[in-house]
Amino acid sequence: MSREAVLEAVCGGEAECREELANAPKEVESFLGPFSTFVPIVGELKPPLIERVENLASAEALAGDRELARLAVSRRLAELYRDKFGEWEGDFCPICGRTPVLFLVRRQQGPLFETASKTAKCVCGFSWRYRWWRCPNCGAEGRENFEVFLREGLEGVFFYRCSKCGYVHVEAYGEPDEVVQYGLRILARYVAGD
C-alpha cells in the first residue's frame, strides 16, 4: 500500500487534511522532544508500565495535558523497557495498556513454504508478536468470529470486525511508514465501524 493511497482513503481531495496527516509524525516528534531526557521512575516492572510510573504527575505538568503526557511517557518507557517484554504475548500493550488497532504482517520465505508473522504495533512504539484470528479486545478466537473488510485502493490491507464485541483492527502487509500507520488507525474507525 502506498502513502498516496492511504492519504486518498483518509482525506480524499482535502489538501489541509492531507498536509496534517503527512505532518503528523513530525508534529508528534516535536511534541515529544522535551520528554527525550525525561526519566520515568518505575516502581514495579508489571504491565502496564505506565500505571507504575511514580513521577507521572511531573510529566503531566510538563505536557499540560494528561493524555499527551501518558503518550510521551509511554514512548519513553517503550524505548527503555522494550527488551524486558520481548516475549510478551498479551492482548494489550504491556507499556501503555492500550488495545492494539494496527497489526503488521511480514512474510518470510521458509525452506519449503512462505510463512508470515503478525505483529501488534502500538501507538507508544512497542511491538509484539500476536496470534492470528484473535480479537485483542475480547479474546474471541477463530475466523468465524470476524467480518473482513477491504478498501479499494489499499492493497495488502484488511480490516477485521469482531462479531462478539465489535472491535475493529487492521492488518497491513509490509513495512508501512508512520504516516501510513496513522492513516490506517484512522481508517479502522470508519471502514468497518458502525
Image: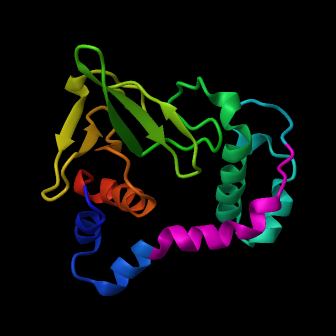
Q: Quadrant of residue 180?
A: bottom left
- For the point 58% across and 68% down, the residue is 28
| Magenta segment main secondary structure | helix
Residue at 82% across, 68% down: 61
Q: Is residue 126 left or right of residue 44?
A: left
Chosen colour scheme: rainbow
* Left or right: residue 158 compared with residue 177: left
Residue range highlighted in magenta: 23-41
17 in magenta: no
Would you say residue 47 is visible in this rendering? no
Above or below residue 27? Residue 181 is above
- Name the residue nearer the viewer: 76 or 111: 111
Q: Is residue 58 visible?
A: yes
Q: Which of the two residues, 58 or 85, is positioned nearer the viewer here? A: 85
Q: Residue furthest top?
A: 112
154 over 134 or under it: above or below: below
Measured as percent of width and height from the top left, residue 128 is found at 52, 33
- Residue at 26%, 34% (x, y): give it: 163
Q: Count the marks.
A: 0
Which quadrant of the figure contains the C terminus?
A: bottom left
Point out the residue furthest to the front here.
111
Compared to residue 147, the image places residue 76 above or below, namely below
Residue 2 position in % (x across, y down): 26, 60
Q: Nearer the viewer, residue 24 or 54?
A: 24
What residue lies at 34% left-to-right and 78% top-to-bottom? 18
- Name of the residue lying farthest toward the left: 152
The spot of residue 1 in percent (x, y) is 25, 55
**x, y percent for residue 153:** 15, 59
As displayed, is residue 65 above or below residue 162? below
